[in-house]
Amino acid sequence: MKRLILSLAVPLAIAFAGLTPRAEAQGTMRVAVGTSLNQLDPALTTIGDEYVYVHLVFNGLSRIDHDLNVKPDLAESWTASEDLRTWTFKLRPDVKFHHGRTLDAEDVVATVTRILDPKTGSRARSNLAMIKSVQAIDPLTVKFDLEFPYAGFADIFADRQVRIIARDRVSTLSTEPIGTGPFMFKSWAPGDRMELVRYPGYFEKNLPKLDAVTVRVIPEAAARIAALESGAIDIVWNLPYESVDKLKKSSNVRVDSVSTATWDGVIINNERPPFNDVRVRKALALTIDKAALVELALFGQGDPTHSPIPPSHPYFNRSIGFPEPDIAAAKKLLAEAGYPNGIDVPFQVPQEREQRVRFGVAVRDMARAAGIRLNVERVPFASYAANVSGKAQIYVDGYFARPTIDSALYPFYHSGGSWNRQLWHYKDARVDKILDEARTTNDAARRKALFEEFQVIVNDTVPGIIAYSAAHVNGVRKNVENFKSTPMQWLELKDVNLSR
């Protein structure tokens, strides 16, 4: 079969017109992403396109299946003490790293110790903050002693950055990463492509089915879609929502989607005027129609929400509801806060993230009626983290689903949370108390009550405005078999094959 790889050097017009296919390995899956990877070290990854690579090359102690159940991965089992302060993991005995050495407990110790070291700079550090000590009991047994009880401890090892690395290959992680996953790293041309090949020693027998995976970086959404339709690409990861209806009519492409806890929102710096006044934040919230934002930003591919807890989750607080915008009440709050004539503030959006641009423009238009004049500034995504995140008064951003409710909330809302310090700088003693208790109780009913109360408080104090939980949609050629989109938005390819 003839294959084609889209070159970024080829003008967009040519991409639309169709390119001349070239021979490619029959079992090579070609995946298109929109952003270049900045980081190959799994502990330091921060964007979705990097998580795609991490999931193909590395494993965690646990994993999350398509139904959001936590299952064994590198660990074949785990047990916890009655007080949930001591956890013991038993490793699979048949796992080898890509360079041939057998995985052992010291690799787990080295991985966790490295993430916990502030000098490493991993965003996953706060999710492991409960660990007091970790030790290798024997080559296949790892014991964790925790500072406090933590019911979801096994779950956090399924997260993106908490992937087990080879302790003797740490120095080359950013150039020649070594993992235990179904595919091995072959090469990486920044801004162009990553080549992965099948790992014949993968511990799940007869997997993966593919010979190789090529991850192509194609920044232009239109070029990604054109490549998919022409057969140049097999999968477009994270399909632009505006393309969904068109591709549903295609004879060669199918649309595969799943609900997620991934969210977009208005990030508000609670320490900077005028948003250090809760009345101003509440006034903005009163102008927002979240159901309309789902249609305008996602083309209907999502659901309104109050926090990172999605409506599909049993802890979602349905009693809060989504009232209609109240412009009169918003104006009244602004006047009480000392802004009877409204406010003017710059409002940053990431220019290459068209979904978030649409979101930001819609929020701007909604807020204007109350005298909140948000002056939209498009900022290149590559400089967003350095120049906008955690620094601007108000801006648009979004974050991927986390493996547990605790890891979705604690880092973002606790006064000591790593993401909170990067984003909204929010402090509420009631929220801190709720989050501290929720991560230590093994009582599901109590946890549900705590998280429902949490949603009431953040809905009232408005640290930021989380508008919706977004669906994850992939565009897939119809000759791609056994592919399913995942709620965590990483790419599962070990069971996938290409029909002839």
Image (tube, helix red, strand yellow):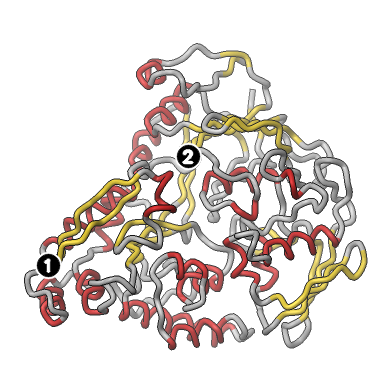
Question: Which residue was labeled with disc 1?
Answer: 370
Going from the N terminus, do you reach mark 2 or mark 1 first? 2
Per the model, the C-alpha gap separating discs 2 and 1 is 36 Å
Residue type at tag 1: Ala
Whether residue 361 sits left or right of residue 104 in the image: it is left
Residue 426: percent from the left, percent from the top? 39, 76
**Quadrant holding the C terminus:** top right
Q: In this view, does 446 lie above or below 28?
A: below
Residue at 25% across, 56% down = 347
**Quadrant holding the N terminus:** top right
Residue type at tag 2: Thr
Residue 186: percent from the left, percent from the top? 71, 32
Q: Does residue 470 appear in this view?
A: yes
Q: Label 1 crowding class (10 Å Cα cut-off): few <14, some 14-19, many 20+? A: many
Q: In this view, does 301 lie above or below 322?
A: above
Per the image, label 1 sits on a secondary structure element best described as: loop
Residue, far right: 138
Residue at 59% across, 59% down = 67
